[in-house]
Image (cartoon, rainbow, N blue to C red):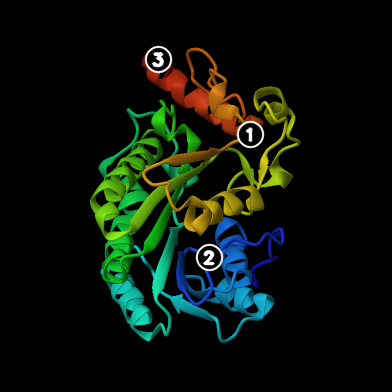
Amino acid sequence: MTAKFALPPVPEFAFPGFADSCSVVVGGSSGGVGSAMVQLLLNAGSAVIMVDRDEERSGMLTAAVGHDESLLPVLTDITTEDGIRDLESALDLADRPVRHLVNVVGGVSGDDVGHILHLGADQWTRALTTNVTYALRTSQVVARRMVQERRGSIVNLSVAEADRAMPWFAFYGATRSALDSLTRTMAVELGPFGVRANTVSWGLINSPRMHPAHTSEGNRERDVIPLGRRGLVADVACAAMFMLSDLAQYVTGQNLEVDGGLSLCGPHYEHTENIPVFLESESARDGLRRQFDRIAHPDREHRG
């Protein structure tokens, strides 16, 4: 089955500080924020090493952007040590100084959404691997080269809710929060060598993987987001480009939340069952209610 792929639209902004440099995008072929980052970096004059494990989508992105000499796709699973070695090999091939890294990979699957009493050790390990460990390893590998140049910028993508309680998403929230903390420490330890590290955290975004538009009419978002809409892929990508660019030369250790003001309001969870107010899928809401009911009333299940 052929995957559907379309380049996300991005603005023609002029971001300074990318000419004659090489940038690394980890997770670039989904058609979402990573793909937008690849486009914006190429448009800004940077060569790009794009790391992704999806061969079909990577090929589609490469064909769509049309920068054959400036874009190097690396097909590998970056959450493995083999993937890290593949990244190191690609860095050795770069003919420009590697000055920018953006870690896009991360997320949570439907199988890992649940009450904290129902989540297991394997799910915790998966959350750590997907949301924290790979970003630590890629940052270490790329930052070593940045330190030699005494210049560089790292942006880790996270979620705006990571510094708050995230009912039903406990492991995802905890590991994203860990990534935010790791980024702050990186900023302090790498700062003396001219390397900056920041986080860009998104809220509800229309993207192929995160909150796709076709699953929602957007009514709940309009009720809870001050700007009255979900964000666009370009909204997040442009914020990350700002943090990577020379426009933010004196910014490090910060978390830029791109959520339309959602984090300023609350609560975002319904009382008792703690179901997210922006979850529009009734089947998903019913599933969480049933799970909560089994915990709250175990006798009913035995009698049934």
37 w.r.t. 234: above or below: below
> Based on the displayed image, in which of its 4 quarters is residue 202 positioned?
top right
Pick the residue in front: 171 or 145. 145
- Camera-side mark, 1 or 2: 1
Which residue matches tag 1?
A: 260
At label 3, the amino acid type is: Ala
The residue shown at (66%, 28%) is: 225
Q: Quadrant of the C terminus?
A: top left
Q: Height in image: 259 above or below 78?
A: above
Task: Residue type at mark 1: give it.
Answer: Gly
x and y, in percent, of residue 71 in the image:
54, 79
- Under circle 3, the secondary element is helix
State the quadrant of the N terminus. Answer: bottom right
- The x, y position of residue 137, in whole percent, is 28, 61
Q: Position of residue 78 (x, y in %)?
A: 36, 66
Can the viewer see residue 209?
no
Verify CB contact (< 8 Å) between mark 3 and mark 1.
Answer: no
Along the line of sight, the residue nearer the viewer: 21 or 266: 21
Q: Which residue is mark 3?
A: 296
Indicate which disc residue 28 carries: 2
Mark positioned earlier in the residue sequence (2 or 3): 2
